[in-house]
Image: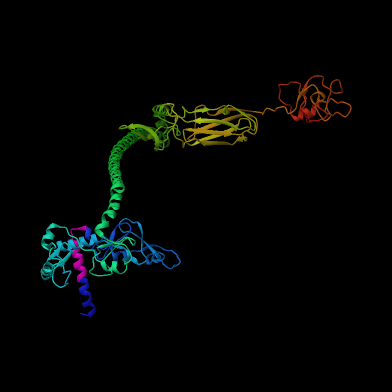
Amino acid sequence: MSQSEQTENPEQQTLNSEHEQSLVLVNPKAVCNVCKRLYRDPKILPCLHTFCSDCIAQLEPFSLSSRSAEKREGDTAERQERAAVTVTVLCPDCDSEVDLPPSGPAGLSTDHLALDEVFLETLVTDGPLGCDLCGEGGAESRCEVCCFNLCEFCCQAHRRQKRTASHSVQSLQDLKSGGSLSRPVLCGLHPGQELRLFCQPCDLPVCLECAATLHRDHRCCPTQNVINRHGDSIRELVTVRLRPRMERLKDSMLKVEISQEALQERMDATANEVRAFARAYASAVEAHCLSLLHRLEELRVQRRNQLHLQQAQLQQALLDVGGSVEFAERLLSCGSDAEILSAKGVTLRRLTSLAESSYDPPPASVAPDDGSSISFLSWEPAGEMGGFPVVGVIHAKTVDLSKCTIEGEGLQRGTEREQGLFVLVCRDSAGEQLARGGEHVLVSIVHKEKKNCTMESTVVDNSDGSYSVSYTPEETGAYSVWVCVKAQHVKGSPFPLNVKRKFRHHVGTFHCCSFCSGGGFKEARCSCAGTMPGGFKGCGHGHKGHPGKPHWSCCTSFVEQSECLPQSVIAAISPRGHLRTVEL
């Protein structure tokens, strides 16, 4: 084993013993909350929390601040000390920002109450106590006046001395059973000297030697003479101001705790309600799901039976027709003339019966049901299930061509170069509108006289069973509108469509003459043949070419409620041609 290992082992053993000691401590007032061990040189922070001096020194600085101040003659050491750098740390207990003196943790006040607790804890846990006088023997007694721990020899000497013979000395065993003791507060500058005096100018407790030397010119009084005044100031702050506040804070804390408990209870109750609702709603959704699946199974059986029936009918018809055709062909190909003539009667009767009355559905009407008409609409309301509203329905409606309807005037009448509109509404066998789209809709518009003249149409699926159809005719005349769903005409198709010429509105003025309607303006013109002298370009009463009656200035029509004449007609009846009227 190396020398370093031998050196470390005693230190490790000491730490282990201290750790084991901290595990069995019964008085938390004697333990530092940072190192979790008995206090070693306990110091009081400005927030009145106590920690070991070493623990305070190891705290991470929160901030640093320097106070610049000029040194002046007569400045005390304390004043010069405040002018130095101030270190701010966070209290490990309350997280308050506290300032350390420039001298560090050593400049903080010592917590003598904590030292008493450490001594009592050591005494209770049978820790080793040395004699405060000789420092050699183990302490067995304690002087309550001097607050010294004494070994047996020093205890006898203490009782023999005239000055201390009257002091009350008790055994440590009796003190241990009592659970209370006090220690003398000794001077840090003069070891062994108790702080029995109080320097009023310096506001510090001092020993006799400090009073005789450092505080010689100061007024120093015994501590028992000033304790009442200073203790009363502390007691007044505690009793009058802080303790009532503490009671109010406790009441507020109690209210907050009650509110927290009530809040938690309410949250738990609400959470239970949510879970119960979720379970009930999940059950309702599950029941709705089973209902939908049951409905789907019913549709499957129904459609399957229909297909089986259709298949059986087609198969029987095929057997009947196939057998008869086979017999007839074999008779014609293999039979002699006599055989054919002898079997002619029964063969013709059978073939005629099959041709006229046998099962022969049109190919277009035989549309095997592939289930495309069955759909699930997830967001459509489906009523209630177990008291809860549910959504999602199975739609199995199929379009019935005989029930489909067409709405809108654009199916019967149209105007040249104007858009025409009509709406196809697909309905089921009950006449109800389908709630879904997706049908194959074909619209074809053909001129009845001009077979090569077709019209383009646009079909828009509205996804609600209706389809909007729009078209724009380029020529007038009679048209046929074919409306087909699944390659089959709807009822009434093809529909007749009559496209008329667009109504031509007048662009001029209905007047007696240009002179009157134009207010004597020379540039006012008219399409009639009338002229006026003096530079007027329009017509006038009693002048040459005036029609002699009111007329339209744009086309010379004499009917006020009429359509404007085409340009070809105007050119034929007016040598001027078509002239625009200038309106004021």
Q: Which residue is situated farthest in the top direction here?
A: 549
What is the basis of the colouring in this image? rainbow
Report the label total: 0
Residue situated in front as seen by the camera: 343 or 263: 263
Residue 306: x percent and y percent? Answer: 36, 32
Can you say whether 121 is above or below 448 in the image?
below
Residue situated in front as seen by the camera: 395 or 352: 395
Residue 501: x percent and y percent? Answer: 66, 28
Residue 485: x percent and y percent? Answer: 49, 33
Indicate left or right for 385 with 503 as reference: left
Residue 57 visible to an observer of this rendering:
no
Can you say whether 452 is above or below 260 in the image?
above
Q: Which residue is situated farthest in the right direction here?
A: 534
**Majority secondary structure in the magenta region:** helix
Residue 7 located within the stretch drawn in magenta: no
Please give the range of residues in magenta. Answer: 13-28
Can you say whether 228 is above or below 61 in the image?
above
Residue 108 visible to an observer of this rendering:
yes
**Residue at position x 61%, y 34% from top?**
472
Indicate left or right for 218 with 472 as reference: left
Residue 438: x percent and y percent? Answer: 46, 37
Residue situated in front as seen by the camera: 234 or 535: 234
Q: Quadrant of residue 561?
A: top right
Q: Quadrant of residue 108?
A: bottom left
Q: Quadrant of residue 390?
A: top left
Residue 27 located within the stretch drawn in magenta: yes
**Looking at the figure, which quarter contains the C terminus?**
top right
**Looking at the figure, which quarter contains the N terminus?**
bottom left
